[in-house]
Image (tube, rainbow, N blue to C red):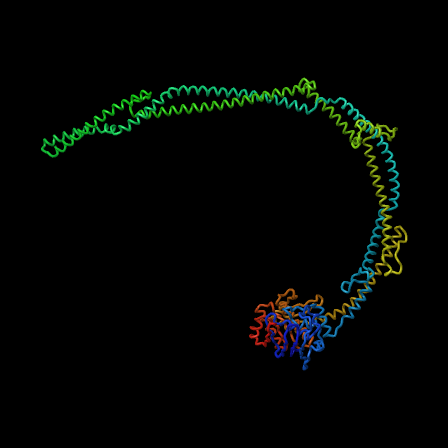
């Protein structure tokens, strides 16, 4: 079966297209928006107008194509598109066309695999399982089962709620059997007898307890009356003049008085110390002042000496230097004259003359210096005398300078010390004044506190704090007794209402409450009859008896409730679809429960019997259907066409393609005897597997004859290596007689692979 001619007059924006298919492997190539997908859709709709039922969203154009496709089957060419479809030529459904002969956008997987394999099997083997399914459906209804596969009892309303009735009946029968055992074990009759005995003993215990409680009331009344007397005495003796707060105030004042006295003593001691320190500073100041008087009197004379000395040094600095050179001049003159005479004697005239001249010059220089030094010495004696008159202890001019500096230093030191002493005396005076102020404040505070203490004591006619403290202690003792009595009376009798306009005084309230307490108490009972140990025992005994009576009552009531419950559950059972007569409780007794259990067991057995019969029949038809399912498996196998193609595509990595009818999945086998499902294979291997399955199924449908494949970029996501491998497989199929029409927008297919495999290529222009 091949396509020999494609003629499209109109399909949406697709231009008129005519093509004669001459080779087994042809490529239709054009860029995106060139209409290749529209062309493929038009061909598919001409082959099978109902193709949309098998390929969702196949229509991009909301119209049917105008044109025809010529299909060659055997030796006959048939034109499809004018009312005739592919299904009229060969027994193929739209699902077969989509799942086998059309591959779009690398989607190689078969849709609805199991149903598809089943339809192929029926078609090629004339096998039909619909009749088996119908019989099994009727058996499911008769046996009231959930489904053919599940075969459990159904709870559906259409199945008479069989599972629910069976479960309810089984549970009810089990519950009744269990309760029969519990009722026999608990001995209901014995429980009834014990209930009578417990009631009698409980009445006796209540009577004795009433006597003990009356005696307890009289005993409590006596105790509270004593507390009321204590309260009354306490409020009469309470002294409102003294209080703990006033005592606290007196003690505080006493502490502050003692603290003030301590502070006064400390301040007086501190002021005495400051005054002594000031006296010492004043004494030292007077001493310094006395020493300064003669020094300050000489200060002007010493300053004048300093100025005279400076003037002298400025005027006679060279004369003082000349006096130091006079010995040298003197000795030079003597030596020169002497050597000149010696030279003349020995006959050295020139040397003698020169030495004589030198000696004469030295003698003249010595004379000049001698006169200058003599005048300077007279002035020195005057300066020295003036310094000595100023009181400086000096004997030479050189000692005058250090002496004047020492005088100035001594004068400045005494003046600084005097100023410091005056400052310190001022500080001491300030401290003495502050101390005096603090002393006055402390004395005033002490006086004020003493006056306050005296006033507080005088108000209550207390001689001292100790007496006041004793009166407060007595007051606290009375208050404590009063409060204890109030607490006891309040706990037992409560307090007057505070919401009344004129609340009742507590004393009157408690007196009235005590009268009310014994108003209804048996006067024949004496307080001495009260036994503190016996009453708790009676209460405990009464509680135990009451609890036991309640348990017995609850047990007997529970028995009656269970009987009512079982009766209600029996009446609620829907038994009519399963039994001729309804189930009921014949008597409200254990024997009646035994009878109804027997009837319930019969109901369960009837429901299960109907289900078991249906299951046995279903098992028989399962065996028949398994034989039919096995025929699907025969589509595949180690000797099948799918195995041959897959083994070739995978270079013998896989040796077989089979079908597991129970799991409804294709399986592949390796040389190592490993078995994989498609989900366990790589994406590329999975595509190769489904492609092999398509080839095998197609040849089965076409009675082992090759057909055509319409591929729309079947290897779209493949890399260059896998794309090359895919085209090798397609070439082998074409060599075996299959027709391959490959639609693509990939450049490497439309240019490179077309040249590599020398394929015929129909170029598609972009849509205008």
Residue situated in front as seen by the camera: 135 or 390? 390
640 lies left or right of 724: right
Q: Is residue 312 left or right of residue 705?
A: left
Q: Residue furthest right?
A: 587
Residue 135, located in which quarter of the rendered image? bottom right
Q: How many marks?
A: 0
Q: Say whether residue 268 is visible.
A: yes
Residue at 23% in and 26% down: 373
User: Residue 559 at x, y = what percent?
Assistant: 86, 48
Q: Is residue 730 left or right of residue 587?
A: left
User: Which picture quadrant has residue 8?
Assistant: bottom right
Q: Quadrant of the C terminus?
A: bottom right
Q: Is residue 639 visible?
A: no
Q: Is residue 642 above or below residue 283?
A: below
* Residue 163 image position (x, y, % from top left): 81, 59
Image side of residue 171 versus residue 119, left or right: right
Q: Quadrant of the N terminus?
A: bottom right
Q: Is residue 743 above or below residue 170?
A: below
Q: Give the percent coordinates (x, y) of residue 22.
A: 62, 79
Horizontal and vertical percent for residue 2?
65, 78
| Residue 385 vs residue 543, the one in the foreground | 385
- Quarter of the view holding residue 315: top left
The correct choice, above or below, for 396 with respect to 617 in the image is above
């Amino acid at each position: 079966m091949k396509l020999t001619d494609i003629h499209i007059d109109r399909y949406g924006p697709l231009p008129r297209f005519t093509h004669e298919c001459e080779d087994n492997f042809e490529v239709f190539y054009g860029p995106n928006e060139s209409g290749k997908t529209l062309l493929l859709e038009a061909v598919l709709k001409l082959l099978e107008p109902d193709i949309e039922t098998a390929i969702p969203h196949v229509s991009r154009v909301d119209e049917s194509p105008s044109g025809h496709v010529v299909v060659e089957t055997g030796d006959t060419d048939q034109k499809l598109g004018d009312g005739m479809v592919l299904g009229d030529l060969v027994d193929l459904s739209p699902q077969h066309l989509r799942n086998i002969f059309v591959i779009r956008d690398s989607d190689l997987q078969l849709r609805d695999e199991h149903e598809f394999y089943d339809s192929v099997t029926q078609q090629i083997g004339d096998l039909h399982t619909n009749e088996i399914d119908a019989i099994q459906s009727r058996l499911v209804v008769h046996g009231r089962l959930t489904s053919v596969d599940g075969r459990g009892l159904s709870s559906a309303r259409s199945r008479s709620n069989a599972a629910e009735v069976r479960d309810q009946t089984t549970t009810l029968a089990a519950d009744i059997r269990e309760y029969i055992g519990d009722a026999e074990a608990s001995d209901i009759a014995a429980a009834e007898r014990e209930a009578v005995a417990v009631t009698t003993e409980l009445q006796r215990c209540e009577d004795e307890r009433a006597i003990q409680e009356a005696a307890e009331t009289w005993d409590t009344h006596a105790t509270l009356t004593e507390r009321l007397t204590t309260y009354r005495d306490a409020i009469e003796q309470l002294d409102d003049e003294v209080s703990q707060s006033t005592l606290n105030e007196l003690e505080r004042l006493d502490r502050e008085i003692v603290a003030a006295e301590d502070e006064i003593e400390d301040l007086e001691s501190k002021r005495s110390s400051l005054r002594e320190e000031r006296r010492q500073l004043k004494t030292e100041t007077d001493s310094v002042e006395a020493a300064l008087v003669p020094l300050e009197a000489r200060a002007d004379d010493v300053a004048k000496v300093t100025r005279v000395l400076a003037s002298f040094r400025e005027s006679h600095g060279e004369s003082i230097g000349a006096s130091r050179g006079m010995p040298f001049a003197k000795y030079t003159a003597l030596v020169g004259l002497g050597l000149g005479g010696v030279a003349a004697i020995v006959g050295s005239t020139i040397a003698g003359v020169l030495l004589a001249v030198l000696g004469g010059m030295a003698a003249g220089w010595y004379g000049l210096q001698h006169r200058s030094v003599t005048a300077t010495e007279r002035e020195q004696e005057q300066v020295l005398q003036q310094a000595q008159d100023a009181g400086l202890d000096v004997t030479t001019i050189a000692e005058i300078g250090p002496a004047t500096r020492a005088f100035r230093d001594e004068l400045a030191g005494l003046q600084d010390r005097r100023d410091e002493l005056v400052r310190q005396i001022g500080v001491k005076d300030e401290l003495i004044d502050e101390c005096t102020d603090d002393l006055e404040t402390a004395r005033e505070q002490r006086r004020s506190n003493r006056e306050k203490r005296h006033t507080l004591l005088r108000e209550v006619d207390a001689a001292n704090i100790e007496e006041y403290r004793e009166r407060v202690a007595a007051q606290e003792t009375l208050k404590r007794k009063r409060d204890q009595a109030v607490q006891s009376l309040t706990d037992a009798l409560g307090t007057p209402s505070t919401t009344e306009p004129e609340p009742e005084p507590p004393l009157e309230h408690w007196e009235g409450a005590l009268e009310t307490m014994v108003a209804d108490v048996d006067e024949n009972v004496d307080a001495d009859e009260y036994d503190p140990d016996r009453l708790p025992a009676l209460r405990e005994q009464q509680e135990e008896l009451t609890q036991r009576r309640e348990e017995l009552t609850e047990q007997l009531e529970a028995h009656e409730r269970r009987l009512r419950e079982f009766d209600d559950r029996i009446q609620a059972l829907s038994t009519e679809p399963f039994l001729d007569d309804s189930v009921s409780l014949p008597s409200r007794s254990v024997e009646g429960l035994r009878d109804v259990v027997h009837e319930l067991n019969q109901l369960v057995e009837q429901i299960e019997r109907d289900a078991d019969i249906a299951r046995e029949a279903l098992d028989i038809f399962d065996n028949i259907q398994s034989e039919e399912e096995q025929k699907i498996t025969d589509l595949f196998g180690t000797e099948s066409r799918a195995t041959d193609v897959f083994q070739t595509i995978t270079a013998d990595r896989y040796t077989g393609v089979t079908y597991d009818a129970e799991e409804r999945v294709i399986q592949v086998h390796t040389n190592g005897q490993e078995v994989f499902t498609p989900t366990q294979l790589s994406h590329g291997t999975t595509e190769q597997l489904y492609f092999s399955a398509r080839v095998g199924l197609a040849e089965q449908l076409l009675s082992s004859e090759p057909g055509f494949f319409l591929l729309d970029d079947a290897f779209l996501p493949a890399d260059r290596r896998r794309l090359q491998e895919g085209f090798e497989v397609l070439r082998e199929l074409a060599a075996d007689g299959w027709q391959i029409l490959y639609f693509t927008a990939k450049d490497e297919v439309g240019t490179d692979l077309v040249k590599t495999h020398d394929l015929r290529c129909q170029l598609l222009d972009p849509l205008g």
